[in-house]
Amino acid sequence: MATQRTVGILIFPDVEVLDFCGPFEVFASAKVEDDRLFKVSVVGETTDIISCRGGLLVKPHVAFADSPKFDLIVVPGGSGTRTEMHNPALIGWIQSQNESSEITTSVCTGALLLARAGLLVNMPATTHWAHFDELVGHFPELQLDNTRRVIDNGHIVTSAGVSAGIDMALAVVERLYGRHIAENTARDMEYDLS
Amino acid sequence: MATQRTVGILIFPDVEVLDFCGPFEVFASAKVEDDRLFKVSVVGETTDIISCRGGLLVKPHVAFADSPKFDLIVVPGGSGTRTEMHNPALIGWIQSQNESSEITTSVCTGALLLARAGLLVNMPATTHWAHFDELVGHFPELQLDNTRRVIDNGHIVTSAGVSAGIDMALAVVERLYGRHIAENTARDMEYDLS
């Protein structure tokens, strides 16, 4: 039986819905026969219900204070990142998880939070096309690359805006479990694997 | 200013996450300048938190009993549809909404629920590729068409599996507000408009 990995998906007020629901769908769907390859948890500062961008109401499974160490973490974007980049509890959670994570990922302006956590030093990275200037404004040392939808540096994987989180998650599935599993996952979602 | 429409997105236990989060993202994002074109609500049998497929916890904004009449409804799929097709409260909500809706839509095996509500008579329809036989088994009179990702009959619009809900919602945006608005919405999501 293939190794099951744990995934912690971060959410916060005004997180962009598809940024985290796309990867959630991929990781919660990937399987070998009937064995699920990932155990997915949604993590918030507390377990109080969070209002996402557009008003979707989602309750985290686990709070920062009770958070186990996850094999993979997903840091999504959204308008709320501009507040959260100044939230030491959230940035601290990312840093702490990253110390032991196998893979740390971002979607869209989640890259702003990884940059703030000091995790995008000396490597190419990407974000939503409309926010390149904003990221470089905050972090002039960033090496942003707008030619790729997913940029895989091994430990750190960043992706472009919103729906690109689906491609990122499928790319991670492919790296960890092989092309065939990624193809099956994409087919179950009727999504074109890139 | 363009007319704002209301959208009611149905959820139920073991609803497939991307089936409803894809359309949520599209309808919550579509705008003209800064004016949002849709007001999106999530509707459940009650407003108790619902566990989606894979365990995502979502709280509906409104219960069937308090539900206004929506301009558009979205009926997603997922493993929970096999239970919900026998739930008279849920099927009754779909039928009641459909009497006054401008557009009634389904994603994936949400078509099973529309069929059960008697709404797919004498028209082509689609569902998730893996569930064509199951649908025809329940409803032999259905005219399923596996050649199109979105089938728009005017009042009733059905779509293929999971990620096809994004295409369905973008197609509805295009019909109601024009190609330019649909293109902008897709670009904001970094999604390829078909």
Image (spheres, coloured by chain):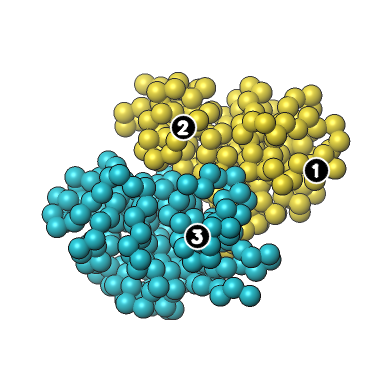
Chain colours: A yellow, B cyan
> For the point 76% across and 41% down, which residue is it?
A132
Image location (x, y in percent) of residue B186: 57, 51
Give the answer, above or below, for where A143 lies relative to A90: above
Reading the image, the residue beneath label 2 is A193
Q: Which chain contains the residue that carries disc 3?
A: B
Image location (x, y in percent) of residue B121: 20, 64
Q: Which chain contains the residue that carries disc 1?
A: A
Mark 1: which amino acid? Asp
Image location (x, y in percent) of residue B112: 26, 56
Report, in whole angstroms, how far the alpha carbon at label 2 lies from the one at label 3.
25 Å
Reading the image, the residue beneath label 3 is B174
Mark 3 residue element: helix
Q: Are marks 2 and 3 in contact (CB under 8 Å)?
A: no
Report, in whole angstroms, how far the alpha carbon at label 1 lies from the one at label 2.
29 Å
Mark 3: which amino acid? Glu
Res. A141 visible in picture: yes
Q: Which chain contains the residue that carries disc 2?
A: A
Image location (x, y in percent) of residue A168: 56, 34
Give the answer, above or below, for where B22 lies relative to A143: below
Give the answer, above or below, for where B37 lies relative to B15: below
The local crowd at label 1, few if under 14, some if 14 to 19, many if 20 or more residues have their Cα within 10 Å, is few
Q: Are marks 1 and 2 in contact (CB under 8 Å)?
A: no
> For the point 60% across and 25% down, which residue is it?
A102
Marks 3 and 1 on same chain: no
